[in-house]
Amino acid sequence: MTEPGKISEQPVRHQRADSRATVSVLVWGTLVAVVVFAVSFTIRLIGYDNLSDLVGEAGVLALLATPVAALVATAVELRRADRRAWVMALVVLLILAAAALLAVFAPH
């Protein structure tokens, strides 16, 4: 306990939410996308263009899904530690879901 008017000499410790799952999802998602793109490139060099296109599309899907999966991991990690950030992560996920549904099912 410090006396009034004196500054405490103890360091301030902030509680931070664990972010290991989010970082792991981002790293692994990126690595998967890079490997799939490399495989697609190799297949194209061999001369199988149609197969290369399919594999390349899988790489694009992996690349697009990575931040969404990371946002889900963030929401799970923040569920108890930071309610406001958890709610914001869920709102962003709902917005992404709505945008995806509109992109797929809206009349063109």
Image: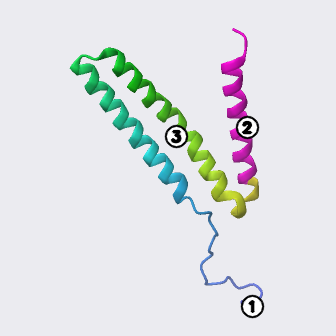
Q: What residue is at 31 percent from the left and 31 percent from the top?
A: 39
Give, as a single range, the part of the protein colored magenta: 85-108
Question: Which image quadrant: the N terminus?
Answer: bottom right
Q: What residue type is labelled 3?
A: Thr
Give how far across and how far down residue 26 sits, in percent: 49, 46
What kind of element bears circle 2? Answer: helix
Q: How many labels does the image show?
A: 3
User: Residue, x 69% and y 64% (percent of image)?
Assistant: 81
| Tag 1 residue | 3
Q: Residue at point 34% right, 21% down?
A: 52
Name the residue beneath numbered marker 2: 94
Residue 51 vertical position relative to residue 22 in the rendered view, above or below: above
Q: In which quarter of the image is residue 97?
A: top right
Sequence-wise, the earlier of marks 3 and 2 is: 3
Q: Position of residue 7 (x, y in %)?
A: 68, 82
**12 or 2, which is in the foreground?**
12
Dominant SS of magenta comes to: helix
Q: In this view, does 29 lie above or below 24?
A: above
Q: Is residue 52 left or right of residue 96?
A: left
Residue placed under numbered mark 3 in the picture: 66
Q: Is residue 63 left or right of residue 85?
A: left
Farthest residue in the top direction?
Answer: 108
Q: Is residue 8 covered in magenta? A: no
Mark 1 or 3: the one toward you:
3
Report how far apart the C-alphas of labels 3 and 2 lie in the structure.
Answer: 16 Å
Q: Which of marks 1 and 2 is nearer the N terminus?
A: 1
Secondary structure of the residue carrying numbered label 3: helix
CB atoms at circles 1 and 2 under 8 Å apart? no
